[in-house]
Amino acid sequence: MSNVIPVILSGGSGTRLWPLSRKSYPKQLLPLTGGEHSMLQETALRVTHLGAPIVVSNNDHRFMVAEQLNQVLDNKPDIILEPVGKNTAPAIALAAFAALERSSDAILVVLPADHLIPDQKAFHAALETAVNAASEGKLTTFGIVPDCAETGYGYIKATEEHNGVFALEKFVEKPDATTAQRYLDSGEYYWNSGMFVFKASTYLEELKNNQAQMHSICQQAFAKSEHDLDFIRVDKILFEQSPEDSIDYAVMEKTANAAMVPLDAGWSDLGSWSSLWEVMEKDKDGNVMIGDVIAEDCRNSFFQGDEHLVAAIGIENLVVVDTSDALLISTKDRVQDVKKIVDKIKSSDRSEHLLHRQVFRPWGSYEGIGEGSRYQVKRIIVKPGASLSLQMHHHRAEHWVVVVGTAQVQRGDEEILLSENQSVYIPLGEKHRLTNPGKMPLELIEVQSGEYLGEDDIVRFEDTYGRSSSD
């Protein structure tokens, strides 16, 4: 399988798993099922035998995606940055053009970054069948063998099996309960997995036949891409002109070469709190309990605690998710409506849909721990050897107190070395930079004071990571 290339789509925001999943740190970057690896890492490890993947990510997640993949992969991935989200068809087109630079006969294995597939043996067997079909010119998808009348997934109807590969008759939208039961009873329908295997050249040819404008724009945008550190930056002006569409609508529903391979491997797209409850280990009363949780006389519920003790008595079929700045309580049968809550948060001009209290940066992270009129307090962690940008602020001054580790501070023309319990003051308008020169994480407390304390009050002069003031 030397010409088989994994393509991992990692651009989603995971709205339905709020408050754990947020736009700045979505579900694919989280270890949702309690293991040590994030969903993105699990996806990459699932196909590590195929070599270095091509990953399509958005700009905001690029450093976290790169760091997580470098932790688990021996081969460095190609990370393509989408300037804007245009759905799956253009994203896969970019990956296809990149794959053709590796091999003119490249076969793509397209995988969303946030799926759970417990039975690796069954997946690899189905993958081999799909690769064989793709080598013969088929655009192959995986149809999940359904075990219930699920209304949260789209379905595929398949007929005429040959050597484990079915002809794909049609895609259908998410059904109501009665229709879903009819699909299940017929034995002819499968859940639409959103995973695909095909030759890069075949996909692009079909895209050109069915979505000529999208094909042309993606081709031009990729041709004008630039390498930036570990990333491939697609031309933004061109890519913004691309139509927005899914691979299902743009190609799979129109091609005469669509095929399907059944997959029975415990698959889940972990698209809601109820689907996460279904796949997690439960106690004798059917409860999933993550973090600091005490439950009395509770059944078939999902509990997750972050910083606080979560205590529950006498409840059934609820989801309770507590984070440092938000608490979600829902019945399990209404968790698909979490998106409505997120929409209300957005319309209220709040930030809880965007950021956790702890915000990750390529150099480490910061966490808000207190605020008031004209001041806020943050806990900052800087990785060993990492450095913040050389910057200044128009509206705030800063006071840093080292808690753990050693800090190297550039303040104007001064170089200051601080150890634990030492501090430094950065006046408003002064150029400054913070570096961790040590071999252990640097932890410090930052007190900001001023008339405006927003994160966009940063003017960068130099940056190791190539970020602009607005990035």
Image (cartoon, rainbow, N blue to C red):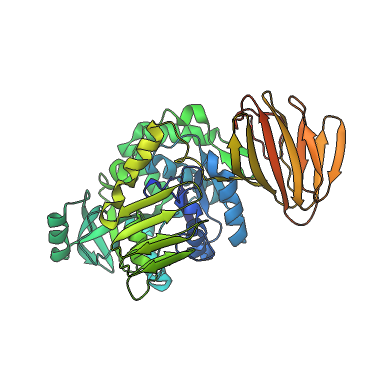
Q: How many labels does the image show?
A: 0
Q: Residue at x 36, y 66 (%)?
A: 279
* In the foreground, 285 or 224: 285
- The picture quadrant where one finds residue 158 is bottom left
- Find the residue positioned furthest to the bottom: 284
Image coordinates of residue 78 in percent, x first then y, are 57, 49
Is 402 situated left or right of 213 in this image? right
Q: Write the residue at 60% across / 44% down.
A: 369
- Picture quadrant of residue 268: bottom left
- Quarter-wise, where is residue 322 in the image? bottom left
Q: Would residue 150 appear left or right of 92 to someone viewing this image? A: left
* Residue at 61%, 30% in the rendered image: 453
Q: Which one is nearer the viewer's eye here, 443 or 56?
A: 443
Q: Is residue 306 visible?
A: yes
56 in relation to 311, above or below: above
Q: Position of residue 60 (x, y in %)?
A: 54, 40
Q: Nearer the viewer, residue 115 or 440?
A: 440
- Is residue 189 positioned above or below 297 on the image? above
Residue 73 can be seen, yes or no: no
Please tell me whether residue 115 is drawn above or below residue 299 in the rendered image: above
Front residue of 16/138: it is 16
Pick the quarter of the image with the C terminus.
top right
In the image, taking residue 257 as reference, residue 302 lies left or right, namely: right
On the image, the x and y values in percent for residue 277 come to 35, 63
Question: Is 121 placed left or right of 166 in the picture?
Answer: right
